[in-house]
Every structure is written in structure tokens, then in C-alpha cells.
């Protein structure tokens, strides 16, 4: 398993950053060669399931995920936390999305993910971590429009 983390401070309210980061279909537009399909009716909550399909034709794979913790900001909570479990045949692991008020305004966003890719030897974990950080960093930037 490889672990990586993406952190950003943005001039958005935590509620707005949360809405953008948990718009699951929008994720597919930010990751190359990926489409995201939500499998459960809305609104998003613990138990929401979705699948990101990445690749082209026979070289594609599914990355099924389920929201296992859903604590949006608001209602007296200045920050939010969403935890996802990945249960695919190719990609397994988890992700945690956090938003919190930042000192001086805006919010701090953190995306932490631990991945295992089937068939990929552990010697490639550092490369996978750098690639994940770059790919998800770009996706977070685009979702937050920063």
C-alpha cells in the first residue's frame, strides 16, 4: 500500500469546497480517461456508492467506492470529513477528504489516500505515491477552481 496526501488552502467557504469535492460525477471530468457513475440515489451520505471507470476499451478498469463516513460542514460544524473505501479488483484502499476553516478566511482542504494496485510490486510504491499526489492534486485544483 502507498500513502499520499494533497493539501490546499483556498478562498472558499468550507461548505462550498465540500460541495465541489464531493460532487462524484465531477471527479470523472478531472481525471484523464475516467468516468464516474453514482450507483445509489442522492443525496450523498454514508452508504453512497459510485464507480470510477478508468482507461480505454479492454484496458479499462473499475474503481468501486463507498462513502463510509459522511460529516459535512455546517450546522455548527466548521469543517467536514468524508471517508471512502475502495473495493475494486485492481485498486483497493481508502481515501479521506477533509475541509476546515482556515485562519484568515477561506478553508484548508486535505485529501489523504492509501492505495494498493493489484499486480504492482511494492518497490513501485514511491512512484505510485508521487503519481497519485500529482494526479489528485490536479483534480483537487480543478474541482476547487484554484
Image (cartoon, rainbow, N blue to C red):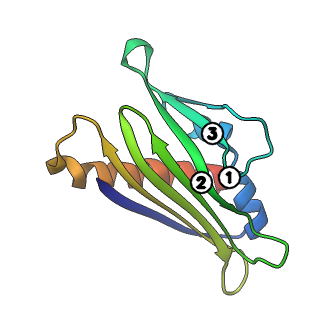
Label located before the other in sequence (3 or 2) = 3
Q: Residue at left 37%, top 31%?
A: 89
Residue assigned mark 2? 68
Question: Does residue 145 appear anywhere in the picture?
Answer: no
Residue 101 position, x and y percent, is 69, 78
The residue nearer to you, when weighing 78 against 49, is 49
Q: Give left or right: position of 66 versus 104.
A: left
Determine crowd level at label 2: few under 14, some 14-19, many 20+ residues with C-alpha closer than 10 A: some
| Label 3 SS | strand
Residue assigned mark 1? 46
* CB under 8 Å between discs 3 and 1: no
* CB under 8 Å between discs 3 and 2: no
Residue 2 position, x and y percent, is 30, 55
The residue nearer to you, when weighing 111 against 141, is 111
Q: Residue at left 70%, top 86%?
A: 104
Q: Give left or right: position of 105 versus 33.
A: right
Question: Does residue 103 appear anywhere in the picture?
Answer: yes
Q: Give left or right: position of 2 versus 12.
A: left
Q: Give left or right: position of 15 versus 113.
A: right
Mark 1 and mark 2: Cα distance apart in space: 5 Å
Determine crowd level at label 1: few under 14, some 14-19, many 20+ residues with C-alpha closer than 10 A: some
* CB under 8 Å between discs 1 and 2: yes
Residue furthest bottom as drawn: 103
Residue 118 position, x and y percent, is 28, 36
Residue 14 position, x and y percent, is 73, 69
Amino acid at each position: 500500500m502507498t500513502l499520499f496526501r494533497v493539501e490546499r488552502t483556498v478562498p472558499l467557504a468550507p461548505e462550498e469546497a465540500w460541495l465541489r469535492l464531493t460532487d462524484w460525477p465531477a471527479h470523472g471530468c478531472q481525471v484523464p480517461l475516467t468516468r464516474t457513475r453514482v450507483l445509489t440515489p442522492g443525496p450523498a451520505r454514508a452508504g453512497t456508492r459510485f464507480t470510477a471507470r478508468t482507461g480505454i476499451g479492454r484496458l479499462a478498469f473499475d474503481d468501486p467506492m463507498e462513502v463510509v463516513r459522511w460529516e459535512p460542514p455546517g450546522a455548527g460544524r466548521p469543517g467536514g470529513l468524508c471517508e471512502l473505501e475502495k473495493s475494486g479488483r485492481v485498486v483497493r484502499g481508502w481515501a479521506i477528504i477533509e475541509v476546515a476553516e482556515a485562519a484568515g478566511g477561506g478553508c484548508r482542504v486535505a485529501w489523504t489516500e492509501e492505495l494498493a494496485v493489484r499486480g504492482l510490486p511494492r518497490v513501485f510504491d514511491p512512484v505510485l505515491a508521487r503519481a497519485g499526489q500529482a494526479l489528485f492534486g490536479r483534480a483537487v485544483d480543478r474541482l476547487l477552481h484554484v
